[in-house]
Amino acid sequence: MSVTPEKIAFLKSFGKRIEALRTEKNLSLRQLSQNCDIDYSDISKIEKGLRNIQMSTVLELAKGLDISTKELFDFDIDK
């Protein structure tokens, strides 16, 4: 799968959404990591748009943030 500018923009926008939700809930990277089955360094990479994640990771992030998976995707893509 090739990495296009559109895909990079999506990953960065998704990462910003995760970071915004985490800070809104006053969670550190480590606290979010403890709430779900994801290493804190991986969460950091996701927030920076450096990690293309699996659907199971989306579920873990939603669990860790105590929100629905749908809420994770409530963002506009930065262009």
Image (spheres, grey):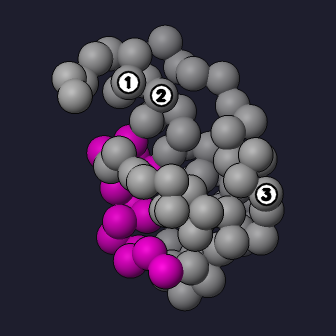
Q: Identify the residue at the far bottom of this view.
A: 34
- The boundaries of the magenta stretch are 37-50
* Residue named by callout 2: 10
- In the rendered image of this protein, does residue 76 appear above or below residue 64? above
- Give amino acid for label 2: Phe
* Residue named by callout 1: 7
- In the rendered image of this protein, does residue 17 appear above or below residue 75? below
* Separation of marks 3 and 2 at Cα, in angstroms: 19 Å
> Mark 2–mark 1 contact, CB under 8 Å?
yes
> Mark 1–mark 3 contact, CB under 8 Å?
no
The image position of residue 66, as x and y in percent, is 77, 70
Callout 1: helix, strand or loop? helix
First of labels 3, 2 by sequence position: 2
- Does residue 28 appear in this view? no
The image position of residue 53, as x and y in percent, is 40, 51
- Give amino acid for label 1: Lys
Callout 2: helix, strand or loop? helix
First of labels 1, 3 by sequence position: 1
Callout 2 crowding tier (Cα within 10 Å): few <14, some 14–19, many ≥20: some
- Left or right, 34 with respect to 24, comes to left
- Quadrant in which residue 43 is drawn: bottom left
The image position of residue 52, as x and y in percent, is 35, 45
The image position of residue 56, as x and y in percent, is 51, 62
For residue 68, the mark is: 3
Please tell me whether residue 25 belongs to the stretch shown in magenta: no
Identify the residue shown where x is 66% and y is 23%.
Answer: 76
- Left or right, 8 with respect to 16, comes to left
- Give amino acid for label 3: Ser
